[in-house]
Amino acid sequence: MTNRLLKLFGKLAVVAALAMVIGLVSVSAQAPNGGAGNDPSFQPPRTPWGDPDLQGHWLPSGAGAAFSNFFGDEPARGNRPRPPQKPMVVDPPDGRVPLQKWALDKRNEIMAHQDKVEYLDPRVRCLQSGVPRANLPVGYNTYQIVQIPGYVVLLYEWNHMYRYIPLDGRPHVSSKIRMPMGDSRGRWEGSTLVVDVTNFDDQTWVVGHGAPPDDAPATSINTGHGVFHTEALHVVERFTLTDANTVRYEATIEDPNVFTRPWKISFNAFLRAPKDHQLFEYACHEGNGRNVKLMTGFDPETGTMTKTKKD
C-alpha cells in the first residue's frame, strides 16, 4: 500500500509541475470566452496521444440554465426581467429534485437550523463541496483541466480541490474507503469524457448554489441547499467540448436511500478563460468569525464566550 501511495503522489507531483507548462496549450490558438456550445459540426482538438483535448483554464458558465432552480419554477423577482432559462434539472421533466418524503422533511429540518453547526452547509464550514456540486457555477471558483496519457486531472480553485481520474478501466477502490469527492473512474465515449463516481462519504450536499436568504423556509428556497445524500450516492458525469470555448456538463445522480428515482442535471458549465488566467489561493477559514462562534461559542469580535461549547 505504501508503494502504491508513493507512486500516486509521484504522479500527482508530475501533474502539478506540468500544469503550469501545458495548461494553456489547447487555448493558444483560440479566442477566450464567447462559446455558444451549440455547434453540431464542431470537432474537438486532440492530444498528441489522440484523446479529445479539454485542457486549459475555465470559468464557471451556467449559460442558459436556471442554476439556482432545483425545485420547480423560479421565484418571482418583481419587475426585474430575466431572459428565458432552461431548468438545470432536465430529468424528471418537472425540474424538481425527486426527494423521498422523509428526505424532504429532513431537508426542511436542515434549512430551519442553519444557525446550528451540526446542520450548517458543509461548504460554509469550508469542507469540500462534493460531486456534482463542485461543477455548479460559482463566482469564486474557476477550473483547470490537465491531461496526460491515461489520466485526466481536474483542478478547482474552490477550496483547493482536485480530482485524479484514471482512464485505464481499473475498478473503484474498496467500498471501505469513503471520500467527500468520491472515487472517479473515466472513459471516453466518442468526444465525451464519462466519469463514474462512487465511494462517497455522507458529509456533502449534492447541489446548492449561492447563499439562500437567512431564516427562509426550505419550501421557498429553490437553490438546492440542504439536498443531502448517503454513502449510496452514485454519480455519472459527462464532459463534452461542444465548441472551442464551451464544455457541456451532465450528471446523472442516484441514491436509493434519499431519492425516489435517478435524476439528471445538464448545462453549459465551463467557459474558456483568457490566456492569462490562473487559479488563485482560496481562503475560507480566514476571518470566518461566524463559524468560530458556532463551533466553539467564542465570539472573535467581542472576545467573549456566548454559550457553553457542547462536548
Image (cartoon, helix red, strand yellow):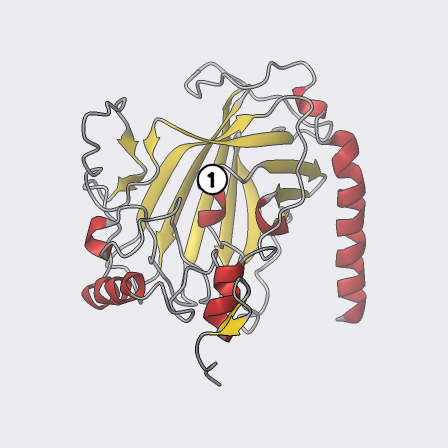
**Secondary structure found at label 1:** loop
Q: What's the residue type where badge 1 is placed?
A: Val
**What's the residue at 37%, 63% (across, down)?**
229
Residue 155 seen: yes
Quadrant assignment, res 15: top right
Whether 30 is drawn above or below 106: the answer is: above
Q: Between 221 and 181, which is closer to the camera in this rendering?
A: 221
Q: Between 204 and 167, which is closer to the camera in this rendering?
A: 204
Whether 12 is drawn above or below 182: the answer is: above
Q: Mark 1 highlights which residue?
A: 138
Residue 199 seen: no
**Which image quarter holds the N terminus?**
bottom right
**What's the residue at 48%, 61% (across, down)?**
290
Q: Is residue 5 left or right of residue 35?
A: right
Q: Is residue 292 left or right of residue 25?
A: left
**What's the residue at 35%, 26% (across, down)?**
64
Residue at the outermost bottom position: 311
* Relative image position of residue 188 (x, y in whole percent): 55, 38
Q: What is the tally of numbered marks visible in this picture?
A: 1
* Relative image position of residue 245 (x, y in whole percent): 54, 21
Q: Is residue 224 left or right of residue 283?
A: left
Q: Is residue 217 left or right of residue 255?
A: left
* Relative image position of residue 31 (x, y in whole percent): 60, 14
* Relative image position of residue 26 (x, y in whole percent): 67, 23
Residue neighbourhood size for the residue with mark 1, other residues' Cα within 10 Å, grouped as few (<14), some (14–19), many (≥20): some
Quadrant assignment, res 3: bottom right
Q: Between 221 and 114, which is closer to the camera in this rendering?
A: 114
Whether 220 is drawn above or below 274: the answer is: below
